[in-house]
Image: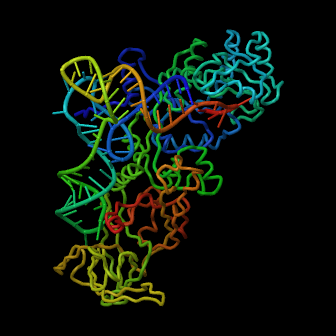
Amino acid sequence: MSEEKSLNFLEEIVEEDLDSGKYTSILTRFPPEPNGYLHIGHSKSICLNFGLALKYGGATNLRFDDTNPVTEETEYVDSIKEDIQWLGFKWEKELYASDYFDQLYLFAVSLINKGFAYVDDSSAEEIATQKGTPNEPGIESPYRNRPIEENLQLFEQMKNEEFADGSRVLRAKVDMNAPNMHMRDPIMYRIKHAHHHRTGDAWCIYPMYDFAHGQSDSIENITHSICTLEFIPHRPLYDWFIEKLSIFTSHQYEFARLNLTYTVMSKRKLLQLVNEGYVSSWDDPRMPTISAFRRRGYTPSSIRTFCDKIGVAKRDNLIDVSLLEFCIREELNQTALRVMAVLDPIKLIIDNYPVDQHEDLQGDPAPSGETRLLPFSNELWIEREDFMEVPAKKWFRLAPGMMVRLKNAYIVKCESFLKDDDGNITKIHCTYIPESKSGHDTSGFHVKGTIHWVSADHAATAEVRLYDRLFKVENPSSEEGDFKEYINPNSLHIIKKAYIEPSLTKASINQPYQFIRKGYFCLDKDSIPENLVFNRTVTLKDAWTKKVNN
RNA sequence: UGUCCCAUAGUAUAAAGGCAGUACGACAGAUUUUGAUUCUGUUUGUCGAGGUUCGAAUCCUCGUGGGACAACCA
């Protein structure tokens, strides 16, 4: 029963290339620059590159695009590798563009020899001026027609640390009149006396992206080099270098990057949020980074499912974050242990339940069949929002004179309540119906509402962190002004002291929980035995709140 | 006043000249000891104008709209 799922345009290209015999197997690559943490947008690219290879029996290299030593660090390399593995993918080889610095240097010399590259002494400003604009052609550099010998000599001197940063560059000799700005004699090498995270101080000249990426693809025999739309104008250059160098012909294909509502997806902006303290770290659970989703309780498979559902195409898109939430809820609904925790407590006293008595009630069994006991007594904590002094229409939780089921316990009826001087409700008095015990209900009462609770004497406490969207608007990047103006000031709500059922004191970090009626939660890495911390991964769908708000 | 990419429900994504479908969302109902889950149903779409064709979301032309491109970033 193979449900024929339609192919995306990249799968079509791969199938064609395989069917036509152009390739007998495919090789893709995932090429992050180690200058930041991976985000959910990268996971689309990861799922695409690794997924394509998996589907068609090929392989994927992990290649760090580390040609700019001033922004790149080993810390990022490590986090990137961890994130890819966590997502569930295995790379064929771990490679670095810097592995090819020697080869790239020889490629450059060869282009100089063929008259396709020259050393330019112009300043950055002069080169920018020479470039022209999209509407006006560029002008040729006065150094453009230097003799080959002189270029060779100067380029070697560049390599030999004889010149200062910025004093000279190596440029490709293409066409200053090209309508495509990238073809107007692009820079191939620049001088940077900077320490490289892998090659140390071996080099003071570093290749630019355009003279590193395609050549690295070619060296590795990458068949399908998949990147995002903004590289489309680079493709003619990508092809030009490969052709002039007469090396293995890799091909570049472009897809539209993922954008998600209520967040930003550029490393530059995410770095700002971290550096300027809007979030606590790269893995602050409000961030769209993979490490943040991991910490927040998202699973690798939920992210992979999401990447599968969003599809792949070439048009700009803005995916509704509710799709991501659907994916994680769908999974957690299957795997989460149901437990009870009261986040905003109010005391409920059962007047007809003996003060010194308690009983251990049976909680809902876990999917594994494992059971747990719920201590019950005359004083409980319930959720403040589960009581209304004056019930709304269609309200079926607690209110004066109304009855509700306490989950896995008894039916109670609200008899009275107390308020403090400010009018805040402080205590709710109820009576319980002894014949209504869960599983043994002979009371004959039928109640519409069931609420969660914990026994006041037996409850443990924990810190609970509730997260909301990081931005107030769907697409912060498209708004006027600075994107940071649109940050949601209420994206984090910390509850210092929530009451949790005793079984949760044994919570473990990879076990998802559903706090019944409150959402899916996971233990945070900040937890210590004296202070457990839970993150809300995602809320439950909530038809009631929605109804009230409308 | 350039070059390139793109245009299908609210958001995404299919339909390879032959019945516009799927998912999420939204809405309504059923079930429910989670106002969750589950189940059922409803809603909404081919940017415009020409052309080719028996037949066009699909091919062509011209518009319109959106996006990308002028870092010694990737």
Question: Up-down: is A122 above or below A524?
Answer: above
Q: In the image, residue A334 lies at what x, y percent?
A: 32, 54
Disc count in the image?
0
Q: In the image, residue A361 lies at what x, y percent?
A: 31, 75
Direction from residue A267 to residue A427 in the image, left or right: left
Direction from residue A509 to residue A127 in the image, left or right: right
Residue beneath the point at 22% across and 79% down: A436
Q: In the image, residue B33 lies at what x, y percent?
A: 25, 69
- Where residue A521 sits, quadrant-wise, is bottom left
**Quarter of the rendering occupied by the C terminus of chain A:** bottom left
Q: In the image, residue A483 lies at what x, y percent?
A: 57, 51
Q: Could you say which is closer to the camera, residue A193 or residue B53?
A: B53
- Looking at the picture, the colour scheme in use is rainbow
- Where residue A450 sits, quadrant-wise, is bottom left
Question: Up-down: is A456 above or below A527?
Answer: below
Q: Could you say which is closer to the camera, residue A527 or residue A516?
A: A516
Residue beneath the point at 33% across and 80% down: A359
Residue beneath the point at 81% across and 26% down: A161
Query: Residue A203: in sight, yes or no?
Result: no
Query: Residue A530: in sight, yes or no?
Result: yes
**Quarter of the rendering occupied by the N terminus of chain A:** top left
Question: Up-down: is A483 above or below A345?
Answer: above
Residue farthest to the right, as pictured: A162
Q: Could you say which is closer to the camera, residue A416 or residue A122?
A: A122
Q: Could you say which is closer to the camera, residue B45 or residue A317?
A: B45
